[in-house]
């Protein structure tokens, strides 16, 4: 028997722990070298754990939903075993748990009542006087995860004691009133799930931004017809030449860089009592993903062509959807752009992504009635919103930088002539 250990990847210095997601393989199943065994979610990214060697998984020492640290051993692979020959060692985590937790997991492990509870879940179930048989597991093969156990503890049924319901009502007639139970919700489904690490980190950073920045938002409107005409004229040739569609975000990125060059304070950040003026333009692009909002960075955006920008945005979008963005791709940034228009947003006040000092909100382009040369005409208009940190960006700089973006979009030739 040749045993190889499967370990959690090395985290970056800013990440101390992660949470295991669902196992891709079970004990007794064959796995190829470099095939993904499981994924680990940190507060920044989701990391894949590849198999260090081909073989059969013979032991799993942690369950989906468990908290793990860098280099922690989570499974073992026998490189000489055959698939199906291994014993179901996956029950070991429950056996190794505290006595109270083990007793809660025992009914599930016995096979008569359903799935196996993870160690963390077994402990929670024991505290709630529940067994694994009382909970519907969402893990692989019906395994009860910590999240399942926590959700079960929040359900009204989980609070029931061993006293029969009629006797309970007779002895404690005012119980429901004393605990403040909302009887109007009876029979109406609810689901309580713990925040993912990424969602918790997003919440923490947004709250930090609101509490530490003096956020003010300035608005303007832009006539998108010149950009739309330019795009319609060259989009087919552009896609044929560069292998990517010509979208609108590349124009917004170029317009933002154009404005940041004119007003460096909007591209600056605060570090203690110092203002750091960045001599480069790393633009964060807010991207929605199944696990939450992420902001990958277009580094040196001033040196990128429209095609380079479109290719990178498409790459980031795919990586975000697959959970493949790296920490390096989301670290840094001097200014961000959030495009709520793809979801139909008319107007919003975006929140600054710290430690940056400003963010541009782009919205849906709609035909609207506007006045030009004393006449009412229909134009495709987009409302722009720029939130900024008033501690280092004055209203004049904020307004003028947004005007510079508007002028660049309404006359794209300015981007070529640097006007």
Image (cartoon, grey):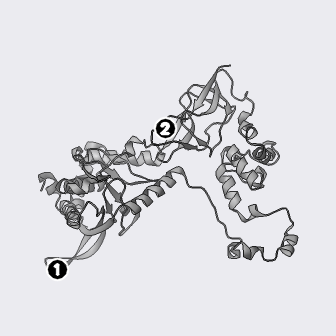
Which is nearer the eye, 149 or 404?
149
The residue singled out by tag 1 in the image is: 375
The picture quadrant where one finds residue 2 is top right
CA gap between label 1 and label 2 equals 61 Å
Residue 233 placement (x, y as % from top left): 21, 56
Q: Residue at x 17, y 56 (%)?
A: 262
46 relative to 190, above or below: above
Question: How many residues crowd around disc 2 within 10 Å: few (fewer than 14), some, or many (20 or more)?
Answer: some
Left or right: residue 44 versus residue 279 is right
Residue 186 placement (x, y as % from top left): 71, 72
345 relative to 238, above or below: below
The first of marks 1 and 2 along the sequence is 2
> Element under label 2?
loop
146 relative to 165, above or below: above
Question: How many residues crowd around disc 1 within 10 Å: few (fewer than 14), some, or many (20 or more)?
Answer: few
The picture quadrant where one finds residue 190 is bottom right
Which is nearer the eye, 352 or 312?
352
> Element under label 1?
strand
Left or right: residue 296 versus residue 237 is right
Residue 359 placement (x, y as % from top left): 32, 59
The residue singled out by tag 2 in the image is: 11
Which is nearer the eye, 314 or 146?
146
User: Which of the image's four quarters has the C terminus?
Assistant: bottom left
167 relative to 58, above or below: below
Q: Residue at x 14, y 80 (%)?
A: 374
């Amino acid at each position: 028997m040749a045993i190889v250990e499967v370990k959690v990847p090395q985290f970056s210095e800013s990440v101390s722990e992660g949470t295991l997601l669902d196992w891709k393989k079970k004990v007794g199943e064959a796995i190829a070298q470099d095939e993904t065994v499981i994924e680990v979610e940190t507060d920044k990214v989701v990391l894949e754990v590849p198999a260090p060697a081909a073989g059969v998984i013979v032991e799993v020492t942690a369950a989906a939903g468990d908290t793990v640290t860098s280099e922690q051993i989570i499974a073992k692979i026998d490189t000489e075993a055959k698939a199906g020959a291994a014993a179901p060692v996956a029950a070991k985590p429950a056996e190794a748990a505290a006595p109270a937790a083990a007793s809660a997991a025992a009914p599930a492990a016995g096979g008569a009542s359903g799935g196996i509870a993870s160690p963390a879940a077994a402990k929670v179930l024991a505290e709630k006087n529940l067994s694994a048989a009382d909970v519907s597991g969402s893990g692989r093969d019906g395994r009860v995860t910590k999240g399942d156990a926590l959700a079960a503890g929040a359900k009204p049924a989980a609070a029931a004691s061993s006293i029969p319901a009629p006797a309970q009502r007779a002895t404690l007639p005012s119980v429901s009133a004393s605990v403040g139970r909302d009887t109007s919700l009876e029979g109406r489904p609810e689901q309580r799930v713990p925040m993912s690490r990424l969602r918790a980190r997003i919440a923490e950073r947004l709250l930090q931004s609101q509490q530490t920045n003096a956020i003010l938002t300035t608005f303007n409107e832009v006539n998108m017809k010149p950009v739309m005409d330019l795009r319609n004229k060259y989009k087919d040739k552009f896609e044929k030449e560069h292998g990517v569609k010509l979208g609108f975000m590349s124009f917004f990125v170029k317009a933002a860089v154009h404005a940041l060059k004119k007003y460096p304070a909007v591209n600056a950040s605060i570090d203690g009592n110092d203002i750091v003026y960045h001599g480069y333009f790393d633009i964060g692009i807010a991207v929605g993903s199944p696990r939450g909002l992420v902001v990958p960075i277009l580094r040196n955006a001033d040196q990128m062509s429209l095609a380079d920008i479109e290719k990178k945005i498409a790459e980031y979008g795919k990586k975000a959807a697959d959970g493949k963005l790296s920490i390096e791709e989301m670290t840094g940034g001097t200014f961000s752009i959030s495009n709520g228009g793809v979801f139909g947003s008319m107007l919003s006040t975006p929140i600054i992504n710290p430690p940056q000092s400003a963010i541009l909100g782009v919205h849906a382009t709609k035909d609207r009635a506007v006045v030009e040369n004393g006449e009412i005409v229909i134009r495709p208009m987009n409302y722009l919103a720029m939130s900024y940190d008033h501690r280092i960006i004055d209203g004049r700089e904020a307004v003028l930088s947004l005007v510079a973006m508007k002028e660049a979009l309404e006359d794209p030739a300015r981007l070529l002539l640097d006007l």
